[in-house]
Image: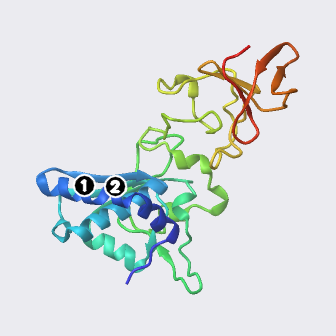
Amino acid sequence: GTLVHRGFLDAWKQIQPQVTDDLVQLIRENPTFQVGFTGHSLGGALATLSALDAIHKAPELAKNENLFLSTFGQPRVGDKKFAKFVDENIKAIRTIVRGDPIPRLPPSWPIPFIGSYKHFGEELYIVNPDQNPAAFIECSAEDPQCSESVPLGELRLKYHGGPYYTVNMGDANREPNEGDENYDYSADPYFNYDPNYNYGGAMGVNGVDGAKRVNATKEVNSTKEVNGTKGVNGTKEVDGTKKVKGTKGVNGVDRAKGYR
């Protein structure tokens, strides 16, 4: 059998029931449609498992020319046998930007009792993302002349977001405590930009160590949140000027429901 990274497999199992059956049914009902599985980073790993799961449930989809897999900045998903299985069943293309460290993980060298992880499919390698992000070369999986050739000291997390053919990764639902080193938030029409927030800093993980708020208070639908101190008898003073009736919120934060 083949081996797959447990974390990727567990993540896929969480969404599998909502995806595979309906997808297979739609593919069978529309056999002439072209169907692409795509994703960035972890999404690329999940797209890979989604494509293979669809083929497992509907074996007639294997080697179907209307199905393809195209990922961006994807980490290694499984071992050598897994990579071979992918290559035998679906056309797969992985786009990688020079200097992106994520596609180098998990490492390809042998791990005791586990084996070694291997990439699959064709690699489209963007050699010079800073000067010419639209240009790429075609490589085979684990080609030592492509992304594998970059010294570890030259890997930078900023390249994980692109540019992929001149397009950088963005997030239309970005939260204020999520940061991105090179993202122009003020120019994003889908992002509710607030000049009072500090959007700088390194990208956070699960909302940690991202961009930090400048102000301690926030108005949302006439409800004020204050990270802080309680007043006396359920009454809170903010900056010594306003008093609000408080009802205790979650995690020790008092919420004042529009009362002043």
47 left or right of 201?
left
Task: Tell me which corner region of the image, top left, top right, bottom left or bottom right, holds residue 44.
Answer: bottom left
Three-letter amino acid code at the position of disc 2? Gln
157 left or right of 237?
left
Three-letter amino acid code at the position of disc 1? Asp
Callouts 1 and 2 close, C-beta under 8 Å: yes
Q: Is residue 48 visible?
A: yes
205 left or right of 245?
left
Tag 1's secondary structure?
A: helix
Q: What is the CA distance from the residue labelled 1 to the residue labelled 2?
A: 7 Å
Task: Tell me which corner region of the image, top left, top right, bottom left or bottom right, holds residue 194.
Answer: top right
Q: How is the image coloured?
A: rainbow
Q: Is residue 76 visible?
A: no
| Residue at 68% across, 43% down | 202
Give above or below for 5 relative to 246. below
| Residue at 38% across, 80% down | 81
Nearer to the camera, 66 or 219 = 219
- How many marks can you see? 2
Tag 2's secondary structure?
A: helix
Per the image, the residue denoted by label 2 is: 18
| Residue at 84% across, 20% down | 237
Q: Quadrant of the N terminus?
A: bottom left
Task: Tell me which corner region of the image, top left, top right, bottom left or bottom right, holds residue 106.
Answer: bottom right
Per the image, the residue denoted by label 1 is: 22
